Amino acid sequence: MTISKNNYQGLQKTLQSVKEQDSKIIEHIVIDGESDDGSKELLKSYTHCKKYVYFSEVDNGISSAFNKGLDRINGD
């Protein structure tokens, strides 16, 4: 799970790194705090990869975003 807000470059590096891994990740959840730096568009460009699931919505800080991610995890 990745939590991000207005960190386009960091998010881009993270998504590329996860994409290049050989592990059998079933899903990579990204919680984006309503970024306005192009992060949402970057995330949309990864929607063709089934392992990525992202949500972009207002939250109440990093703990709130983390809890939202935990609520959405489908795996073990």
Image (tube, rainbow, N blue to C red):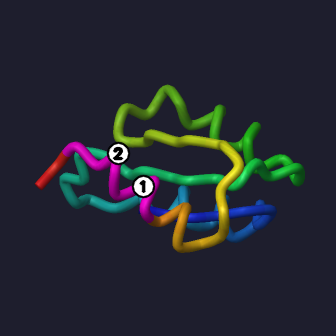
Q: As drawn, which residue projects farthest toward the front?
A: 60
Please state the horizontal and vertical placement of residue 73, each as a whole percent of the image.
Answer: 29, 49
Q: Locate residue 61 relative to residue 39 in the image: left or right.
A: left
Q: Which residues are magenta?
A: 67-74
Q: Amino acid at mark 2?
A: Arg
Give 30 or 33, whichever is nearer the viewer: 33
Residue found 76% across the figure and 67% down from its top: 7
Q: Locate residue 13 relative to residue 39 in the image: left or right.
A: left
Residue found 76% across the figure and 37% down from its top: 41
Characterize the magenta stretch by its predominant secondary structure: helix
Marks 1 and 2, how far apart in space?
Answer: 5 Å
Residue found 55% across the figure and 61% down from its top: 65
Q: Residues within 10 Å of mark 2 (few under 14, many from 20)?
A: few
32 relative to 40, above or below? below
Residue found 67% across the figure and 44% down from its top: 57
**Residue at which label 1 appears:** 69
Q: Locate residue 76 relative to residue 72 in the image: left or right.
A: left
Please state the horizontal and vertical placement of residue 60, each as a whole percent of the image.
Answer: 66, 63
**Residue at which label 2 appears:** 72
